[in-house]
Structures are given as C-alpha cells and as structure tokens.
Image (cartoon, rainbow, N blue to C red):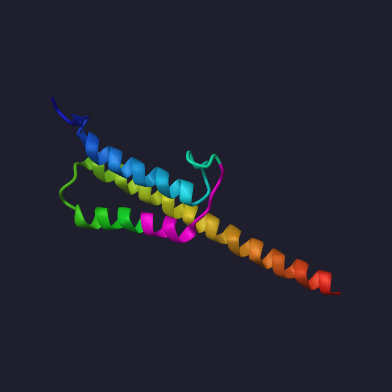
Amino acid sequence: MSNKIDNVDVHFFQIVFSLQTAAMQQLGKIVSPVSGKIERDMEMARTTIDILGMMEKKMKGNLTPEETRFLGHALHELRLNFVDETKKGTAQKEAGKDEGKENEE
C-alpha cells in the first residue's frame, strides 16, 4: 500500500496540516475542539509556525514540488494571519489605553 497521493506523502501532508490547524487555533482563527471556544495564545502560535519554518529549512531539496508548495502555502497563510492578529492585539491595547485616559478625566 502506497502512502503517496499525487506526489505528496500522506504522512507529510498530515503533519503539516495538523500543525497548521493547531496554529490557526492558537491564533484564535478557529474554535478549539476541546473547549468549544476561541482561544488565543500568540506565543504558542509563534512556536508552531517556527516549527513549520524549521521543517521547510531542514527538508529543502528533499520534498517534491507539490510538498514544497503545500508547506510554503501553509507558512505564508500562517505568517499573514500572525501579523494580522498581532496588529489586532496592538490596536486593542491602544484602544484600552485611550479608554483608561477618558475614564480618568
């Protein structure tokens, strides 16, 4: 029985998809299946994205073009979402500071 489908190793696909899904949960983009709630953990998200980045670096030259594209796309999507969530967090902190100043007056 072959573990390859269209030049993508099924196990490779599963590990990348699993880490991508975990990072999206950590970014607060999807609901946690355990708690049923949106949970944000930016440090864990950064670590998970870094693990995928390390995999991309260490596996360079050993992946099929399809696997390279799949991993690259996952990383690109996660990095854009990380920046988006980081900006949201900064904007929310700034809004909180402004509200605090208004309440003092």
Where residue 66 appears, x then y in whole percent? 25, 39
Pick the front one: 78 or 34: 34
Pick the front one: 13 or 35: 35
The quarter of the image holding the N terminus is top left
Query: Which residue is at a point 54% across and 55% down the rendered structure image?
Result: 85
Pick the front one: 39 or 35: 35
Q: Quadrant of residue 4?
A: top left
Q: Is residue 68 left or right of residue 85?
A: left
Query: Which residue is at a point 56% across and 43% down the rendered structure image?
Result: 37
Does any portion of residue 77 appear in the rendered image?
A: no
Query: Which residue is at a point 71% across and 65% down the rendered structure image?
Result: 96
Q: Residue furthest front?
A: 35
Where residue 32 appears, x then y in whole percent? 49, 42
Query: Which residue is at a point 34% across and 41% down the rendered structure image?
Result: 17
Q: Is residue 70 magenta?
A: no
Q: Quadrant of residue 16?
A: top left
Look at the picture and state if 15 lies above or below 79.
above
Q: Is residue 92 left or right of residue 79?
A: right
Where residue 101 appears, x then y in whole percent? 78, 73
Q: Residue furthest left?
A: 1
Where residue 91 appears, x then y in whole percent? 64, 62
Q: Residue furthest right?
A: 105
The range drawn in magenta is 37-48
Does any portion of residue 76 appear in the rendered image?
A: yes
